[in-house]
Image: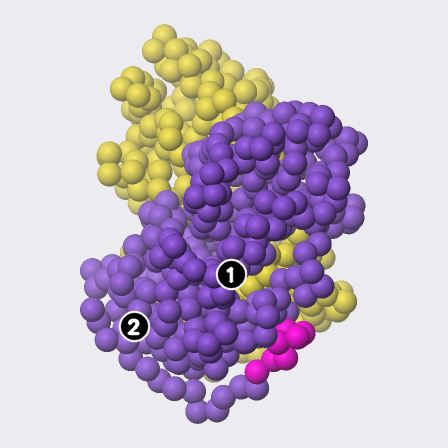
Chain colours: A yellow, B purple
Amino acid sequence: METIRVERAKTLKEKPNPDTVKFGVSFTDHMFLMNYADGKGWYDPRIVPYGPIPLEPSAMVFHYAQEIFEGLKAYRRADGKVQLFRPRDNIRRLNTSAQRLCIPTLDEDLALEAICQLVRLDESWVPSKEGTSLYIRPFIIATDPTVGVHSSHTYLFAVILCPVGSYYPEGINPVKIFVETEDVRAVRGGTGFAKTGGNYAATIRAAERAGQKGFTQVLWLDGVERKYIEEVGTMNVLFKINGEVVTPPLSGSILAGITRDSCIQLLRSWGVPVTERKITAVELFAAGESGALEEAFGSGTAAVISPIGEMDWDGRRVIVSGGKIGPLSQRLYDTLTGIQWGKVPDPFGWVLPL
Amino acid sequence: METIRVERAKTLKEKPNPDTVKFGVSFTDHMFLMNYADGKGWYDPRIVPYGPIPLEPSAMVFHYAQEIFEGLKAYRRADGKVQLFRPRDNIRRLNTSAQRLCIPTLDEDLALEAICQLVRLDESWVPSKEGTSLYIRPFIIATDPTVGVHSSHTYLFAVILCPVGSYYPEGINPVKIFVETEDVRAVRGGTGFAKTGGNYAATIRAAERAGQKGFTQVLWLDGVERKYIEEVGTMNVLFKINGEVVTPPLSGSILAGITRDSCIQLLRSWGVPVTERKITAVELFAAGESGALEEAFGSGTAAVISPIGEMDWDGRRVIVSGGKIGPLSQRLYDTLTGIQWGKVPDPFGWVLPL
């Protein structure tokens, strides 16, 4: 494996207050960079001081969004050590995204080593306060300085880090969502399963409209029939109906969430039946109205579990679990965050101590 | 209207050979830039020397592809003067894209003035050889240095210019295309009608596979039923069937091409019936096999008219117009390029002399 060159920052930045730091705003002292060129492959892996990336205005990423990313976290344990959660799964998913976007894949071991070395170097940025963590953002952008539409011949792989405060500083507050009936996030045959910028750009308008109507996020329907539930906001979504957990299958337009997979594995280990199957908004709201819908929640790296307290759909309103977090959602949240922060055993081998 | 500040380049670049210059590779001496910030609006319109744009690695455009662009051309007439083709329509479409992507719109007059001033300053870059032109690429990117998913609070609007050689240096050569049955470019409710990076990123894989199979481009089907023709490659598509020109309607997943609209207006002025209606691949191939399909062509800024000589669909093959450009396609090409280069009258008021 290639050696990672390290150029240390001459001056170190002041760290933000972990009580008030906002998600994704303050970045650490260093970043990892590696370039790619056709015929040469990935080259010059290096850790350098965090700073601007100068790109030609014609760089392909600005015009054709040939770009992919990942998101994962480093957690400070009570004993002071730092650990990652399923980092190899993020790297594998980055490579899956790369294939869809015609971006050259990364060597898994090198990418993992890059993340580990970078986090180790900036380890003092991993906060220790309850619920805080260091968010890790690996991403790849197309850098060819030409405006023809084709896959780029050059790329930049970067990893940046930012300390993040507790997602729930005032306790878990279930969200209000509504079924989005106009905009569509993704469609089979598109890029919905890949973590690529275009999927997120497409969701901004619906999220803004949701906010204006007093909702936190939208529930996405499939792009073909506009019948089936797909995701909630930028998270996967799971429902507990009559004692069984139901979540949409990975049909091509849904992101293969690592938190989603962790939930499924945990639930099955507890003997809770989980079914990955299509579920229509009609079925969901009928279950909500009959009382069969016991819990509903989003799953993702940032929130881990985001309970849904209220769902609206064209004037129909369903309160879920009395507007509070349900017991299974709470157990998943406690177990997952327990494993992530090293407070409870990790029978699945998910954590990687640095 | 705000005054555009001009900072001239100290050294001018050598111009590329117009016989060999590739599309989108060589950029001129200057570029236009203007920033946006919430509460402040668009500010500091300026023409500066062409050069790298330094962005934070956390800039939203790298992660969530909140980005839009346009493409138009400046043409050198026989009398040496330079003119633009329907530039205001491009600016309007940029604003339409902006609305879908939650990007603040531009003042039309200022944007047009920016383009005109920039082209005037770099006018010596507009080549004069037959078929050559200066390609103009306005674009807007989200620059917030934060990795939360929301619309950016800051943006950069830029215009860059590149001389382009003749699209058909060896005469018009019809292309071979095939019906893409796996990947999808866009779906209603998505971003297909906007000129935004994600739409293009999604098409790269299919275009690469087409190339590997010996085809120039793919014919896109709709994302819902995968039955209806939408576009060809990155162009709109038109078919002449039994004397009538048929083109897919602007249903939300199709780009409202300015060349498409120019074709429709020209055809109608010639008394050729044009219908904007859905057309299935089944109908198209049946028309091809029966001989009812007389001509087929893509329309776009780069090629103007790109005749389709052969279409394949799951093993079925149709040769269109004997594999040659048809008379109506040729007339459209000659008339449009004639108007663009100032060789024939412009009854529609499409050209804007600088």
**Counting residues from the N terminus, which is met first, the one under dot 2 or under dot 1?**
2
Can you say which quadrant of the picture contains the C terminus of chain A?
A: bottom right
Residue type pointed to by label 2: Pro
Q: Position of residue A293 (x, y in %)?
A: 41, 15
Q: Secondary structure at mark 2?
A: strand
Answer whether residue A321 is magenta in the image: no
| Residue at (72% x, 47% y) in the render | B324
| Residue at (40% x, 34% y) in the render | A183
Which residue in the structure is indicated by mark 1?
A: B338
Q: Position of residue B23 (x, y in %)?
A: 60, 66
Eyeballing the image, is A270 above or below B189? above
Can you say which quadrant of the picture contains the N terminus of chain A?
A: bottom right
Whether residue A222 is visible, yes or no, is: yes
| Residue at (63% x, 56% y) in the render | A150
Residue type pointed to by label 1: Gly
Badge 2 vs badge 1, beta-carbon distance below 8 Å: no
Q: Position of residue B308 (x, y in %)?
A: 67, 44
Q: Secondary structure at mark 1?
A: helix
Q: Foreground residue, B6 or A130?
A: B6
Which residue in the structure is indicated by mark 2?
A: B45
Callout 2: chain: B
Residue A117 placement: quadrant? bottom right
Answer whether residue B18 is magenta in the image: yes
Q: What residue range appears in magenta?
A: B15-21
